[in-house]
Image (cartoon, rainbow, N blue to C red):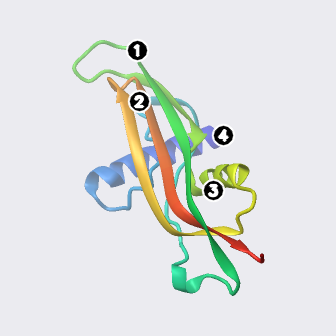
Amino acid sequence: MWWLAAALLAASSVRAQEEGTMARPGLISPGGLVVFYASEGPLSFQTLTPGELPAGARDAGEVRGRSCQHGLSIPVTASIRPTTVSGAAGNGGYNKTFVGILKVRPDLAGIYDVKVDVQTFSILGFYRRICTEILARGYRLGS
């Protein structure tokens, strides 16, 4: 039954976005009949500024990370307004992106001065990818 709740949430989210009544969270939006939806995306992120770093923090340079969601939409009728069967999967959220940064740079205690970009790629509406990209400064604690 979780898939039904996800489909209803996605449908109401798409309608609200079309009406301009809610923030765009960066979730990939399925269309038509949703068969599978297991996707996470960014909503908001609280970042430290250089003046808020903990005592003893040292700059560790620039860090980058990226995580993506993927969607597939298959038309089942050929008409002006086709019916589609769709699905979405992937984690394009901040947490997964940050975990990816820490795998590459395990010496980091955290990040600050974060800049986020959400990039969308689509092939004729059949395949969609939404990626969250983070560009930030890393910091280390201690010597």
Gap between marks 1 and 2, in whole Å?
10 Å
Seen from this angle, which residue lies furthest right? Answer: 143
Instruction: Say what amino acid the circle numbered 3 marks.
Output: Phe
Instruction: Say what amino acid the circle numbered 1 marks.
Output: Val
The residue carrying mark 2 is 32
Of helix, strand and loop, which one carries label 2? loop
For label 4, the crowd category at 10 Å Cα-Cα, with few meaning under 14, some 14 to 19 and many 20 or more, is few
Lower position in the chain sequence, tag 2 or tag 4 = 4
The residue carrying mark 1 is 76
Q: Quadrant of residue 84?
A: top left
Gap between marks 3 and 2, in whole Å?
33 Å
Gap between marks 1 and 3, in whole Å?
38 Å
Q: Is the residue under label 4 in contact with that under label 2 (CB below 8 Å)?
A: no
For label 2, the crowd category at 10 Å Cα-Cα, with few meaning under 14, some 14 to 19 and many 20 or more, is some
Q: In the rendering, at what x and y percent does residue 122 appear?
A: 37, 30
Quarter of the image with the N terminus is top right
Decide: is 137 above or below 5. Answer: below
Lower position in the chain sequence, tag 4 or tag 1 = 4
Quarter of the image with the C terminus is bottom right
Lower position in the chain sequence, tag 1 or tag 2 = 2
Q: Nearer the viewer, residue 104 or 36?
A: 104
Q: In the rendering, at what x and y percent does residue 25 appear?
A: 44, 56
Q: Is the residue under label 2 in contact with that under label 1 (CB below 8 Å)?
A: yes
Seen from this angle, which residue lies furthest top? Answer: 78
The residue carrying mark 4 is 1
Lower position in the chain sequence, tag 4 or tag 3 = 4
Instruction: Say what amino acid the circle numbered 4 marks.
Output: Met
Lower position in the chain sequence, tag 3 or tag 2 = 2
The residue carrying mark 3 is 98
Lower position in the chain sequence, tag 1 or tag 3 = 1
Of helix, strand and loop, which one carries label 4? loop
Q: Nearer the viewer, mark 4 or mark 3?
A: 3
